[in-house]
Image (cartoon, rainbow, N blue to C red):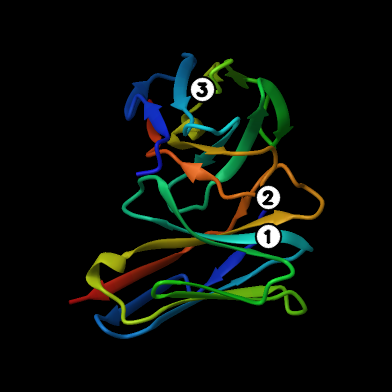
C-alpha cells in the first residue's frame, strides 16, 4: 500500500535555482525520511525528521514537517547538476513500525 | 558509501528458477531490511531481520524467504521466479529493529527474469 505521494512527479530547473519537493502521507507517523537515488542505484539517506520536529537542515537541504496537514517538503537551495536524481520520501508509521513505506518519487533534473 | 554491500550486482534468470541474493550489513548494525523496487516505482518492503529473526513482513508471497547470519549479513531467496519479479532488490541495514532509525542502503541487485 502506498503511504507517501511526492509532488511534483518531475521537476526541471537551472543550476543555482532552488528545488522544492513535497510529500503527503495518509496515516500517523513516527518519522519521515528523505532519500536520493541516482540512476536506479542504491538509495542515499538525506534527512530523518521525527514527528515532534518541525524543521531540519543539512547543508543545502531543508526539510519541514507539518503533521496536522500530513505533509513534508524538501528544499534544495542553490542546486547543482550533481543534484540530478530521484528523491523519495519514506514514512515509518505509528502502526507498522517495522518498515519504511516509500512514495513514488520526484525526478529532479538540474541543467548546467 | 554506506558500507552496505550486495552481491551480485546483476543477475539474469528464467521463469521457474530460484535465486539467492546476498547483503552484508554496515559494521555495528544488527538489522537488515529488504526492499523490491520495480522500474519507475518506489521501493516496497519485503521483510526485515533483527538478530537473526524475522521482524516484520510486507505483502509478498511465501516464495520470498530470508535468512540472517550471526554476523548480521543476510540472504534473500526467491523460489519459482515469475516475470514480475524483475526488479532492483535493495537491502538496508540499521542499528535497531523497526524503521525508527536511519536505514543505510546498499547499491542493489538488478534481477531480470526471462
Q: Which subunit holds the residue at mark 2?
A: B
Vertical relation: B50 (above or below) A17: above
Q: Residues within 10 Å of mark 1 (few under 14, many from 20)?
A: many
Horizontal placement of B90 versus B69: left or right?
A: left
Q: CA distance from mark 2 to mark 3?
A: 20 Å
Q: Are marks 2 and 3 on the same chain?
A: yes
Residue topped by disc 1: A31
Whether residue B112 can be seen here: no
**Furthest residue in direction front, as rendered:** B28
How many numbered circles are shown?
3
Horizontal placement of A51 versus A106: left or right?
A: right
Q: Residues within 10 Å of mark 2 (few under 14, many from 20)?
A: many
- Contact check, label 1 and label 3, Cβ < 8 Å: no
Residue topped by disc 3: B73
Q: Residue at x 79, y 63 (%)?
A: A28
Vertical relation: B67 (above or below) B106: above
Where is residue B24? Give x, y as percent: 45, 26
Where is residue A108? Give x, y as percent: 36, 70
Where is residue A86? Give x, y as percent: 40, 61
Q: Which quarter shows the C terminus of chain A?
A: bottom left
Q: CA distance from mark 1 to mark 3?
A: 26 Å
Q: Which subunit holds the residue at mark 1?
A: A
Amino acid at each position: 500500500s502506498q503511504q507517501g505521494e511526492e509532488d511534483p512527479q518531475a521537476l526541471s530547473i537551472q543550476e543555482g535555482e532552488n528545488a522544492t519537493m513535497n510529500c503527503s502521507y495518509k496515516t500517523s507517523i513516527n518519522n519521515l525520511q528523505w532519500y536520493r537515488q541516482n540512476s536506479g542505484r542504491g538509495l542515499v539517506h538525506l534527512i530523518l525528521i521525527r514527528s515532534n520536529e518541525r524543521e531540519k537542515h543539512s547543508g543545502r537541504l531543508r526539510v519541514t514537517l507539518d503533521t496536522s496537514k500530513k505533509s513534508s517538503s524538501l528544499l534544495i537551495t542553490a542546486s547543482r547538476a550533481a543534484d540530478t536524481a530521484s528523491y523519495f520520501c519514506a514514512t515509518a508509521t505509528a502502526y507498522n513500525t517495522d518498515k519504511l513505506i516509500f512514495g513514488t518519487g520526484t525526478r529532479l533534473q538540474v541543467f548546467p | 558509501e554506506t558500507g552496505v554491500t550486495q552481491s551480485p550486482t546483476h543477475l539474469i534468470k528464467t521463469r521457474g528458477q530460484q535465486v539467492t541474493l546476498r547483503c552484508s550489513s554496515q559494521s555495528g548494525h544488527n538489522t537488515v531490511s529488504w526492499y523490491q523496487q520495480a522500474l519507475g516505482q518506489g521501493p516496497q518492503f519485503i521483510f526485515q531481520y533483527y538478530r537473526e529473526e524475522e521482524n516484520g513482513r510486507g505483502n509478498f508471497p511465501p516464495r520470498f524467504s530470508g535468512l540472517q547470519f550471526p554476523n548480521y549479513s543476510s540472504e534473500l531467496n526467491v523460489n519459482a521466479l515469475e516475470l514480475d519479479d524483475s526488479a532492483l532488490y535493495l537491502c538496508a541495514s540499521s542499528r535497531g529493529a523497526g524503521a525508527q532509525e536511519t536505514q543505510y542502503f546498499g547499491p542493489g541487485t538488478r534481477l531480470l527474469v526471462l
